[in-house]
Amino acid sequence: MTVRAWLKFFTTLLFIGAITTVVTSFFVQPHAYEPYISPFNGWEIFGALIWFIGLGLVYSVISQMGFFAYLTLHQIGQGFFGKYWKHAQILIISFVFFELIYLRYIRAEDPEPLINYILVAAMLLVYSIGVAFVKAKETHQRAFLPAIFFMFVVTTIEWLPVLRVDDPEWLMLMIVPLLACNTYQLLKLHKIVGFKADKNDTREVQTKG
């Protein structure tokens, strides 16, 4: 990847993080704007927008740090575990899925019904599988499991700051830009570096799908 391509990649992700955070804030934190709508106060609304844009930029940087950390981890995992790296990833995904339910439930001061925690973890996993299928279809079938690992495990790790707080508004405000940025990175990188999918791998993925 050239410096120019990386800068474009980086700035696009900053834009995605900022926009998705602002849009999400309209739905999950409307009270940040409501006091300044009637009577209308443009400067205060502008200030609120700047605040959420700043948060979005931070979330984008967290996402990018997580992505490049994962690329390094993946190489180390392949070198250390060899052919068992696939099995290690499955175990870690399973462990994180369990912890995403169990830890949130036992740490909550006033826990919601357990099914709510299960649904959050399940929806994140289903979304990760969907993105991984697209990644495998555009590259090769070997990318399927690593893509799930990144989208589910790494996203959960990046989400930890607000998972510990367990405030529904902040959970939504952070997960949406994280997923948007992580999805973009995963599905865009192979196009930037000029990866060309092997036709045999592509046909095999389509047949299995």
Image (cartoon, rainbow, N blue to C red):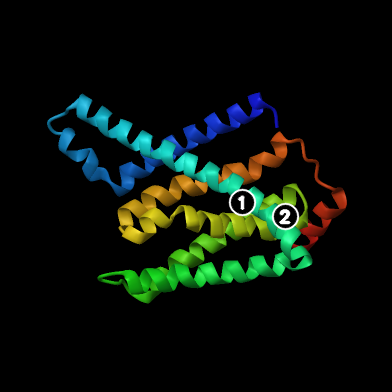
Residue 38 in view in this figure: yes
Q: Position of residue 168 (x, y in %)?
A: 32, 57
- The image quadrant of residue 36 is top left
Residue at the disc numbered 1: 70
Q: Which residue is mark 2?
A: 143
Give the amino acid at mark 1.
Tyr
Q: Is residue 67 left or right of residue 144?
A: left
What is the secondary structure assignment of the residue under circle 2? helix
Q: Nearer the viewer, residue 47 or 68?
A: 68
Quadrant where the N terminus is found in the figure:
top right
Of the pair 121 and 93, the residue shown nearer to us: 93
Residue visible at 49% across and 73% down?
98
Three-letter amino acid code at the position of disc 2 = Ala
Within 10 Å of disc 2 (Cα), the crowding (few <14, some 14-19, many 20+) is some
In the displayed structure, does residue 96 sit left or right of residue 31? right
Q: How many marks?
A: 2
Classify mark 1: helix, strand or loop.
Answer: helix
